[in-house]
Image (cartoon, helix red, strand yellow):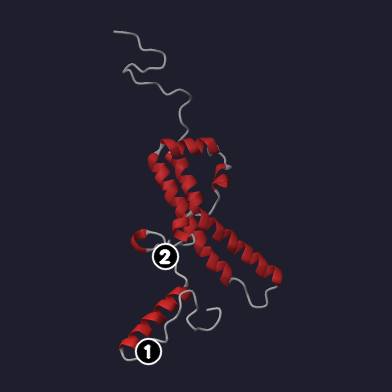
C-alpha cells in the first residue's frame, strides 16, 4: 500500500486545507432572525461572535440549506419593506410641513427603488413588447395613403351604383380631408 500524499486523506480524497468552518446552526439562525426583523445583514455581522462578510459568503456557498433560507428571508424582508411604504404614506398627517412631506416621500422612494431593483420581476416596471404579425416588426402606413385608398374604394362603389366616379382621389393627396391630417 502506498503512503497518501500530503493533500490526500487515507481514502484518496483530497483534504480540505485551512481551519475548520465556524459555521453553526445557531449563528445561521441568528443571521436569518436579524434579516426577518428588518436588520441589515451588515449590522447583524457586527454582533459579537458573528462571522465576517467573506465568511458569510463562504457559508452561503458551502451550505445549501442556509443559502436557500437566506434567500427566502431576504425576499421576505423586501416584501415587508413594500408594506412599509403604505405605512409611511398613511403616516403623513394633515397639516404636515413641506419638509415633513418631503422626508416621507424620500423614505418611500428609497424603498421603492430598492424593491424595483432587488426584485424587478415582482416590483419592477412592467414592460410589454409590441410586435407585428408573426412576431415581426410593427408595420406602419401613412394615414393619407390609407385615407386615399378608402376614398378610391368608395368612389369605385359609387360609380358602380350609378355615380360618375368623380370622387376619385389622386395618389399623393390628402383625399380632400382637413389640412394636416
Q: Position of residue 160 (x, y in %)?
A: 31, 87
Asked which quadrant contains residue 47, the reply is top right
Asked which quadrant contains residue 157, the reply is bottom left
Identify the residue at image location x=44%, y=37%.
Answer: 61
| Mark 1 vs mark 2: in front | 1
Q: Which residue is mark 1?
A: 164
Q: Which mark is residue 139?
A: 2
Number of other residues with Cα within 10 Å of mark 1, as a class: few under 14, some 14 to 19, many 20 or more: few
Badge 1 marks a residue whose secondary structure is: loop
Number of other residues with Cα within 10 Å of mark 2, as a class: few under 14, some 14 to 19, many 20 or more: few
The one nearer the camera, 106 or 74, is: 106
Q: Quadrant of the N terminus?
A: top left
Give the Cα distance between marks 1 and 2: 35 Å
> Residue placed farthest to the bottom in the image?
162
Q: Position of residue 130 (x, y in %)?
A: 42, 63
The answer to whether residue 5 is left or right of residue 46 is left
Above or below — where is 71 with respect to 126? above
Badge 2 marks a residue whose secondary structure is: loop
The answer to whether residue 97 is left or right of residue 15 is right
Asked which quadrant contains residue 26, the reply is top left
The one nearer the camera, 157 or 5, is: 157
Q: Position of residue 5 (x, y in %)?
A: 39, 12
Amino acid at each position: 500500500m502506498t503512503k497518501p500524499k500530503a493533500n490526500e486523506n487515507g481514502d484518496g480524497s483530497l483534504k480540505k486545507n485551512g481551519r475548520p468552518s465556524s459555521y453553526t446552526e445557531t449563528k445561521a439562525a441568528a443571521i436569518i432572525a436579524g434579516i426577518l426583523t428588518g436588520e441589515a445583514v451588515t449590522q447583524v455581522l457586527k454582533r459579537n461572535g458573528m462571522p465576517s462578510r467573506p465568511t458569510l459568503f463562504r457559508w452561503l456557498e458551502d451550505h445549501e440549506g442556509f443559502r436557500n433560507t437566506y434567500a427566502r428571508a431576504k425576499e421576505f424582508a423586501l416584501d415587508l419593506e413594500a408594506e412599509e411604504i403604505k405605512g409611511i404614506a398613511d403616516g403623513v398627517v394633515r397639516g404636515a410641513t413641506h419638509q415633513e412631506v418631503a422626508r416621507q416621500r424620500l423614505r418611500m422612494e428609497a424603498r421603492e427603488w430598492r424593491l424595483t431593483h432587488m426584485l424587478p420581476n415582482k416590483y419592477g416596471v412592467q414592460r410589454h413588447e409590441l410586435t407585428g404579425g408573426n412576431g415581426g416588426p410593427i408595420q406602419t402606413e401613412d394615414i393619407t395613403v390609407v385615407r386615399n385608398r378608402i376614398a378610391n374604394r368608395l368612389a369605385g362603389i359609387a360609380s358602380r351604383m350609378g355615380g360618375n366616379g368623380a370622387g376619385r382621389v389622386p395618389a399623393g393627396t390628402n383625399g380632400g380631408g382637413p389640412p394636416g391630417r
